[in-house]
Image (cartoon, helix red, strand yellow):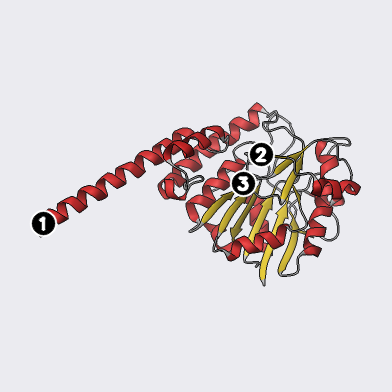
Amino acid sequence: MISIAHIINPVKAKDGSELFIAQPIVFEAMRKAKEFARDVDAELFSAQYAEDLEIIPEYFQKTANLENAIQINGKKKLPLIKDILSRLYENSNAEYFIYTNSDIIILPHFYETIAKIIEQGYDAFIINRRRIPKIYNSVNDLPFIYSDIGKSHPGFDCFVFKRELFPKFILGEICVGIPFVEATLMHNLFAHADKCKLIDDLHITTHIGLDVMPKRDKEYYNHNRKEFEKIKKELQPLLSIKKMPYAEYSFIARTFKKALNPAVFSMMNLELETKSVSEKIRFLWNEFRFRLLKK
């Protein structure tokens, strides 16, 4: 039986906010998915600040309260992704870890599907969500939420990876809830995993709201962007086109897909493409030389 530990970062949101509406649905969906799973040992964890404890259901294993934060000019404090994942690493010996955003609703067969993907030999993968309209606002709507196929979404918000990969991750001071957290996790997975995959054609997670690019706080965005630039420099030597998303497509097709995906960076991938071509040329040249030597 495959063991899985799933962590989220619940927040005591303002009454009436999107997160205030979504989180109770997220909690109940996770409980139902754990209950549904028969061939998977699924554990539910939370990483939270002390002031958020009261909203977390008893069926979550609450890790030690978060202390560190990025807080700019007195705005809301945002936790670091490295602290959230560290809590999971310190509290669970599960074979595989899952991190999802706190507004991602999983379907009942989520953990069973995760296990089946793992059995295919993947040590890491990312699952893109579906997105559904804002007509659902209650746990009682779960049957309709499950049934609504919705629309596809290009962003990354569900990450699955083997426990042993986590110590290798380079996460810097990236905070959650802001762009570049998804890019940071994605590039770490593709850099360190032996067999990693982007899965964008399954209906096992969903999100209330059809927006693709929501508004972002410029100051927090700039913070994460600067942090990611540092991380990227360290990860780039470990990356190759063969390991990146859309590697199975032709050059033109994968370039087009990467250009449309906000979490995949065109310039970085152009550098990887150049590196790949250079390696192929070097290989062919060496083959040519060695064959001449044999004559």
State the image quarter where residue 118 is shown: bottom right
Secondary structure found at label 2: loop
Decide which of tag 1 and tag 3 comes sooner along the chain.
3
Give the Cα separation between the discs numbered 3 and 2: 8 Å
Mark 3 and mark 2 lie on one chain; the one further toward the N terminus is: 2
Seen at 43% across and 49% down, the residue is: 242
Which residue in the protein does label 1 denote? Answer: 293
Answer few, some or many: residues within 10 Å of disc 3's Cα (few below 14, many 20 plus, some between 14 and 19).
some
Describe residue 271's horizontal placement relative to residue 165 as left or right. left
Tell me what residue is drawn at x 67 percent, y 68 percent: 3
Distance in Å between CA atoms under marks 1 and 3: 48 Å
Kindly identify which residue carries mark 3: 200
- Element marked by disc 3: loop
- Residue named by callout 2: 153
Residue lying at 30% horizontally and 42% vertically, measured from the top left = 278
**Is residue 123 among what the camera can see?**
yes
Q: Residues within 10 Å of mark 2 (few under 14, many from 20)?
A: some
Three-letter code for the amino acid on which mark 1 is drawn: Leu
The quadrant of the rendering that contains the N terminus is: bottom right
Q: Are marks 3 and 2 in contact (CB under 8 Å)?
A: no
Frontmost residue, 259 versus 55: 259
- State the quadrant of the C terminus: bottom left
